[in-house]
Amino acid sequence: MRMPLKLMTDLGRYMRSKRKAGEKYFPLVLMLEPLHACNLACIGCGRIVEYKDTIRDMLPLEEALGSAEECDAPIVSICGGEPLMYKHIVPLTKGLIEQQKRHVQICTNAILLERFVRQVPPSTFLSFNVHIDGMRETHDRVVDKQGVFDTCVKMIKMLKEKGYRVQTNTTVFRETTTEELEELIKMLAGLGVDGMLLTPGYHYQVLTNDDIYLKSDEMPFKFRRVRELSDHYKIINTPIYLDYLVGDRDLSCSPWTTVTRNPQGWKGPCYLITNGHYKTFKQLHEATDWEFYRTKQDFRCRDCKLHSGFEGTAALEFGKSVKDSWRMVRHYMF
Ligand code: SF4
């Protein structure tokens, strides 16, 4: 199975309850950024540019835990910045796991993992999402530091030996070849990773150099190969999202499915673009015209195929078409 059965059933139950209650714009994933500081400075990282003036700010532990309660999303992705640099990362992770209804994913560059796993044991509710953008030369160039690729490989092996669930997150840039993607996917499969997410690089509004990002017309070729490989390897992009990336179908965006909380507040309208930060989750909703962003009318939505917007749409599509639903079940269960 590419995704834990417990996560799939919890997500299905949550979505049914929201629909039964007549709610249309409910979150599936909370992107919890307790800090934006990082021990790397990757090319293409929008966060360290957008938040350079507040890079030392951190969410108090009570607010970080409270934001999960406030939006009540069943999946909490702790990201940043590098979340393992957050001084409350252990009580935050344990506190979320103890709620027994949140599936916690820690998105990390792997450098500080050894210290963390000494304090937090494996759990059905915990998985790691290790950032790895290519084979050794590419990854070390993207993160601008030699040796990080080797650290990732070592840490993935350690996590698997200790019994943790491990996923990887790979950003596909213009320079990434399909041959390298295939080599990476096979290498990660050999390490026993439980799932691989491959997404096009995000063009953050704060970044001026867009030469590294895939253009819309370059995406189909690279992701067609990813889609072929998804028949044989544990690629966790949904088949619907892969169809969108290769240009076989259009999708509307669902930015409300993935909401972002950071030390400045609730970031809106989406993970990628910023109109403002709101004090409460309710205020984010009141301030945002979700239909405007659902239909991609903002000029900043041009060329955007961000997984957090469109994978949410794919999840909401489940059950609407027998063919799509069967493809999703087959993809994740077998
Ligand atoms: S299309 Fe992209 S930029 Fe626009 S709302 Fe969706 S995720 Fe945000």
Image (tube, rainbow, N blue to C red):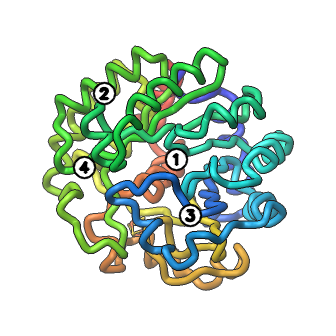
The residue carrying mark 1 is 315
The residue carrying mark 2 is 184
Nearest to viewer (mark 3 / mark 2) = 3
Is the Cβ of the residue at disc 1 closer than 8 Å to that at disc 3? Answer: no
- The image shows a total of numbered marks equal to 4
Q: Residue at x 21, y 32 (%)?
A: 225
The residue carrying mark 4 is 173
Q: In this picture, is 196 found above or below 40? A: above
Q: Residues within 10 Å of mark 2 (few under 14, many from 20)?
A: some
Percent x, y of residue 160: 58, 19
Three-letter code, disc 2:
Leu
Three-letter code, disc 1:
Ala
Report, in whole angstroms, how far the alpha carbon at label 2 lies from the one at label 1: 27 Å
Disc 1 or 4, which lies upstream in sequence?
Answer: 4
Nearest to viewer (mark 2 / mark 1) = 2
Percent x, y of residue 276: 55, 83
Three-letter code, disc 3:
His
Report, in whole angstroms, how far the alpha carbon at label 3 lies from the one at label 2: 28 Å
Percent x, y of residue 171: 34, 46
Please tell me in which quadrant of the rendered image residue 13 appears: top right
Q: Residue at x 59, y 40 (%)?
A: 112
Q: In this picture, is 47 found above or below 329? A: below
Report, in whole angstroms, how far the alpha carbon at label 3 lies from the one at label 4: 22 Å
Three-letter code, disc 4:
Phe
Q: Secondary structure at mark 3?
A: loop
**Mark identifier at residue 36:** 3
